[in-house]
Image (tube, rainbow, N blue to C red):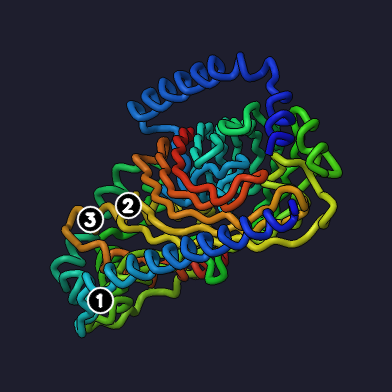
């Protein structure tokens, strides 16, 4: 444990100093944009509210933990949508902050960027990575097609500082995930409420989503299953559960699957707030990480 | 020694983890059961739950006002006999919801052919219809069910664009 502590604390970087200011500015910008948008409900995409999901922690449209097949915002054919999101997750020994942005071009292609910062509150120091994502809608629509919407995506991840993950046994400090995802809304499926189903198959070598590097002494690339079920209690409010299978590549840091219970509220097409309860299992040697999650997304 | 400690810790964790997972499953089931119990399954048709002929006619009228106010959609009705259209749409909604009507209008692909419709227009109409149903006091469950029965028409409407 001492070994972990000294390794993690050595990783504190100048970025840590500048980040709270940057986050504050981002939040202020987000909020002012949200307020401006809430005041002028024009410029919204034409897709039905909620059909763009929210921003997942890796920047792509999805739930919280996993990308969905839907593309971000409510942009449809011939429309372009832009979203920005700020997300924070608190578990027993860690705090994750994500700032992300994405663009939807004609409801065909989604491009996203995300900066993740994991504060190691017990061990000391922080880990960070940048994620560049793209998602292509292969065919379908979450509402109108009997087989739903199908998309393929890629997420290229780069660690800000690879010292700690490499010391833990990770092979690489950069990695690329590819995934295939399907989403479908079942109308009036439970108690007259619509139910949203998502399934994602991801090929990845990322440890803890990439924050602990890529590959390791126990394995490398493998296919992982992710999925979620949500019930739209009202057309603007969905509650559900999400599950993400994870690899376990590092012998010194056992990794577990992630799961969450979530609730997302869409105030309108421009603003959504997501809350969740997380069970992330073991992370970097510290067991049984539980906690909360909040994410605010603005879309225009 | 180190390995033993890790195994021990991991076992106790595994136990906790399993408990947490069981909790999660139980919670999800409880949630579904609760919403299931709150819902009174009825023998009535969707047509009756929508409110029958009067409500459907009110919804169609409400929808037409919304279309008239939407410059992007109203253009498609430039050459439409609105009275005939209203009657035809009401009979279709009645038919689709298992009411005592037989829709005798043109099939959806022919009715919309070469109009240059895009997803934008289709989505717009769905929004207008749902808003009209909401304003006419139709409950969420019935709205969702009707939308669910209309959704597959997307393929027919878009086939000949």
Residue B24 picture location, percent across and down: 44, 62
Residue A165 picture location, percent across and down: 77, 38
Q: CA distance from mark 3 to mark 1?
A: 15 Å
**Can you say whether A243 is above or below B36 in the image?**
above
In the orientation shown, which residue stands out farthest toward the left? B54
Foreground residue among A158 and A247: A247
Question: On what subunit does the disc labeled 3 rest?
Answer: B
Name the image quarter holding residue B126: bottom left
Label 1: how many Cα within 10 Å (few below 14, some 14–19, many 20+)? many
Q: Residue at x 54, y 51 (%)?
A: A288
Name the image quarter holding residue B6: bottom right
In the orientation shown, which residue stands out farthest toward the front? B1
Question: On what subunit does the disc labeled 2 rest?
Answer: B
Q: Residue at x 72, y 41 (%)?
A: A212
Residue A189 picture location, percent across and down: 37, 71
Secondary structure at badge 1 equals helix
* Residue mark closest to the camera, 2 vs 1: 1
Foreground residue among B47 and A96: A96
Going from N to C along the chain, the mark reached first, 2 or 3, is 2
Q: Which residue is mark 1?
A: B46
Residue B134 is marked as: 3
Q: CA distance from mark 2 to mark 1?
A: 20 Å
Secondary structure at badge 3 equals helix
Q: Which residue is mark 2?
A: B128
Inspect this view and state whether residue A156 appears. Answer: yes
Q: Quadrant of the N terminus of chain B?
A: bottom right
Label 2: how many Cα within 10 Å (few below 14, some 14–19, many 20+)? some
């Amino acid at each position: 444990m001492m070994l972990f502590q000294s390794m993690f604390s050595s990783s504190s970087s100048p970025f840590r100093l500048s980040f709270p200011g940057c986050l504050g500015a981002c939040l202020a910008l987000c909020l002012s944009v949200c307020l401006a948008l809430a005041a002028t409900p024009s410029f919204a995409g034409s897709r039905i509210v909620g059909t763009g999901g929210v921003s997942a922690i890796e920047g792509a449209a999805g739930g919280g933990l996993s990308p969905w097949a839907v593309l971000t915002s409510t942009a449809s054919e011939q429309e372009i949508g832009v979203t920005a999101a700020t997300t924070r997750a608190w578990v027993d020994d860690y705090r994750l902050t994500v700032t992300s942005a994405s663009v939807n071009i004609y409801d065909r292609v989604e491009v996203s960027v995300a900066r993740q910062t994991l504060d190691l509150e017990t061990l000391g120091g922080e880990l960070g990575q940048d994620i560049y994502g793209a998602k292509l809608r292969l065919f379908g629509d979450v509402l109108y097609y009997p087989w739903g919407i199908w998309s393929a995506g890629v997420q290229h991840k780069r660690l800000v500082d690879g010292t700690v993950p490499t010391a833990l046994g990770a092979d690489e400090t950069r990695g690329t995930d590819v995934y295939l995802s399907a989403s479908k809304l079942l109308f009036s499926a439970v108690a007259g409420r619509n139910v949203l189903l998502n399934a994602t198959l991801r090929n990845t070598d990322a440890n803890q989503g990439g924050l602990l590097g890529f590959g390791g002494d126990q394995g490398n690339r493998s296919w992982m299953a992710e999925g979620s079920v949500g019930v739209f209690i009202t057309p603007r409010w969905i509650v559900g559960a999400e599950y993400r299978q994870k690899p376990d590549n590092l012998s010194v840091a056992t990794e577990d699957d992630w799961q969450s219970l979530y609730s997302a509220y869409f105030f309108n097409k421009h603003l959504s707030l997501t809350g969740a309860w997380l069970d992330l299992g073991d992370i970097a040697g510290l067991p049984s990480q539980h906690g909360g999650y909040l994410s605010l997304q603005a879309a225009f | 020694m180190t390995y033993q400690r890790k195994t021990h810790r991991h076992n106790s964790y595994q136990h906790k983890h399993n408990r947490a997972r069981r909790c999660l499953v139980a919670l999800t089931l409880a949630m579904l059961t609760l919403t299931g119990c709150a819902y009174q399954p009825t023998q009535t048709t969707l047509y009756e739950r929508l409110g029958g002929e009067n409500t459907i006619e009110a919804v169609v009228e409400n929808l037409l006002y919304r279309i008239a106010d939407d410059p992007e959609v109203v253009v498609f009705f430039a050459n439409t006999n609105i009275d005939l259209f209203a009657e035809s749409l009401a009979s279709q909604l009645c038919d689709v919801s298992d009411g005592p009507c037989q829709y005798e209008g043109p099939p959806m692909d022919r009715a919309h052919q070469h109009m240059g419709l895009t997803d934008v227009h289709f989505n717009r109409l769905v929004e207008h219809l749902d808003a009209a149903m909401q304003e006419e006091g139709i409950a969420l469950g019935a709205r969702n069910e009707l939308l669910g029965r209309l959704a597959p028409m997307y393929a027919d409407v878009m086939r000949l664009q």
